[in-house]
Image (cartoon, helix red, strand yellow):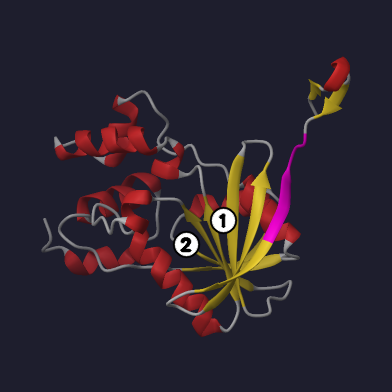
Amino acid sequence: MTENLGVLGKKTPRRTGVERVVNAPLPTVYGKFQAVGYMDHDRGEEQVALVHGDIGAERVLVRLHSECLTGDAFGSQHCECGDQLAAAMRAVVAEGSGIVVYLRGHEGRGIGLLAKLRAMALQAEGLDTVEANLALGLPVDARDYGVAAGMLHDLGVRSVRLMSNNPLKREALVRHGVQVDEQVPLLIPPCESNITYLRTKRERMDHHLPHLDAVAHLS
């Protein structure tokens, strides 16, 4: 734990880890949630977990959703993020209980909004999503899921059924002490605008996207 100089030069410890700050009701078009707000003191990020129903400790239906302004807010068809967020919230409500952890600071797989837009511009010129990040001198995926595990631990969750097509999310949760009993596919029908992006995720990032085989006609 690092220390800062406080009043009169006295050293005061800087907070670290994940701290629960607030719990507020959040009615949505999908159903009623509790928005549990956290502060990630290690990165200075404000985070939120959307909790529906009475969750237990085992086999909780969970989605770790990386922030995507273009997809979540603007309805971009460059990716499937907005549709995945909506599908996850519907699934949790249909289940009767579950959690959607919305991870801020994960924009563009962790490279930030402006860098993501630069990568999208390179993709429009013919690079794929992996090549674009590397051309900018950036990592293909810079996300860290330690804060998500910390939030789940705080909520009393020991094991999950993880809604994800990404094997790295499963590996990260297990590494941080959250058991993954099942990986639940979250497959969104592709369109012409995102089919190349999705195929790149399957072929170069090992995402499990078997439904793409049925849409070979898309360019």
Residue 200 horizontal side relative to residue 165, left or right: left
Structural distance between the alpha carbons of marks 1 and 2: 8 Å
Q: Residue at x 66, y 47 (%)?
A: 39
**Mark 1 sits on what residue?**
170
Name above or below for residue 138 compared with residue 112: above
What range of the chain is rendered magenta? 15-22
Q: Depth check: 156 or 36 in front? A: 36
Would you say residue 20 sits in the magenta stretch? yes
Disc 2, SS: loop
Q: Depth check: 98 or 204 in front? A: 98
Name above or below for residue 30 compared with residue 82: below
**Mark 2 sits on what residue?**
164
Residue 19 horizontal side relative to residue 32, left or right: right
Q: Is residue 178 visible?
A: no
**The C terminus appears in which quarter of the rendering?**
bottom left
Disc 1, SS: helix
Q: Residue at x 56, y 42 (%)?
A: 144
Residue 158 spot, x, y in % from top left: 73, 65
Q: Which residue type carries mark 1? A: Arg
Q: Depth check: 74 or 108 in front? A: 74
Tell me which secondary structure the magenta stretch mostly adopts.
strand
Q: Depth check: 14 or 198 in front? A: 14
Residue 112 spot, x, y in % from top left: 41, 36
Q: Which residue type carries mark 2? A: Ser
Label 1 vs 2, first from the N-terminus: 2
Residue 63 horizontal side relative to residue 206, left or right: right
Q: Residue at x 34, y 32 (%)?
A: 115
